[in-house]
Amino acid sequence: DSNVYTIGTIGPHHVVSTKLPLIGRSRTAQISTGSTTTRLLGTFQHIVHVFVIGCAGGVPHYTDYTKHVRRGDIVVGYPSQEQYVYGIYEVEQSNEGFEFVSTCFKPKSFELYNIVDSIKQNYQQTKSSNIQHPWEKFLAEGIKNLSSHNIECIPPTHNDKLYLKMGSGDVVEVEHPTEQQSQQIKSSKQKDYHSPTLRFGMIAGGKNVVNNDYLKTVLSDTCNVLCFDLEIDQVLAAIQGNRTESFLIIRGISDYHDGTLNKDWQCFSALCAASFMKTIIYKIPFIKKHYQNKQDDDIL
């Protein structure tokens, strides 16, 4: 129900969450998600930061491990050269064959990205060590908590399979590209899904792009698009329309399409994204309210 809000605290911060009632490319879904976002921001008028959390489909790379976005990875919408973090892409015919037509979004405030930059730098310096990162701790706690409520959230690693569509139209299973460290190859079967790989780049949607592997690869190479979802442009438009200046999109990778194909992975992948969100919220400086209106305290 889009009118149900979960209210609580993370660290010293008040938080409120809701579930988008209908995700998709239909007009009904677009209107519904936009209206839900508007109602949330209208009900809680002192919200400073908005996080959009959920699943997406990674853009795989069949030969380069460093570019291969895999199930269980966490993708953070990260500013491009033009500072865009999310885009809707469509394809149109042109004299050169085709061209992308895009509608892109960027936050007005990049306060959250200062925190993301700090985490990114530390992660890149320590990811080869055995240090447990905060989001890994939150992920383990989340799995344990959900299991206590009989909700299975363990990644089904046996079906993390990668397929390649051949020019003939045939689809064949291929091995995931591997990482080579100290002349020792780490098998794809040894991937530790409980230590999600962090990736930073653009997140995108586009109904006539997501079904075309070639177009997705082109966008990945030219715009650093790392994953695709079911289009949240109406959500972002509602956020900006309500003059909320700060938002961040975090996706857990559950398939190689748009996040809707493999339900077995969705719970774990969404929890990965939420765990990283929790890490960021803990790092947001706590500033006591400077306004006199106590209405939000009564609500929260």
Image: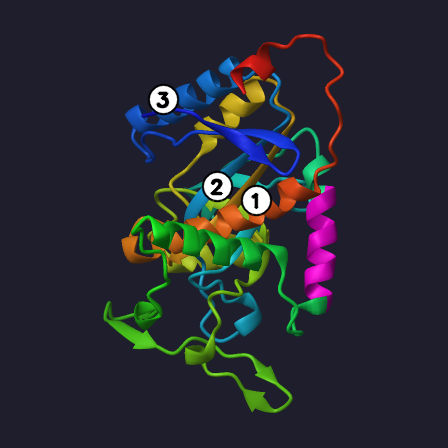
- Which residue does the numbered mark 3 point to in the structure image? 31
Residue 53 disc label: 2
Element under disc 1: helix
Displayed quadrant of residue 121: bottom right
Whether residue 50 is situated above or below residue 60 in the rendered picture: above
Q: Are marks 1 and 2 in contact (CB under 8 Å)?
A: yes
Q: Residues within 10 Å of mark 1 (few under 14, many from 20)?
A: many
Q: Quadrant of the C terminus?
A: top right
Separation of marks 1 and 2 at Cα, in angstroms = 8 Å
Of the image marks 1 and 2, the number of the one nearer the N terminus: 2
What residue is shown at x 33% (from left), y 48% (from top)?
149
Amino acid at dot 2: Ile
What residue is shown at x 44% (from left), y 72% (from top)?
62
Displayed quadrant of residue 107: top right
Element under disc 3: helix
Q: Position of residue 253 (x, y in %)?
A: 43, 55
Q: Position of residue 59 (x, y in %)?
A: 45, 59
| In-image side of 38 versus 179 (left or right) | left
Whether residue 263 is situated above or below residue 300 in the rendered picture: below
- Which residue does the numbered mark 1 point to in the structure image? 277
Q: Quadrant of the N terminus?
A: top left
What residue is shown at x 51% (from left), y 14% (from top)?
42
Of the image marks 3 and 2, the number of the one nearer the N terminus: 3
Q: Are marks 3 and 2 in contact (CB under 8 Å)?
A: no
Q: Position of residue 44 (x, y in %)?
A: 54, 17
In magenta, the rendered stretch is 114-125
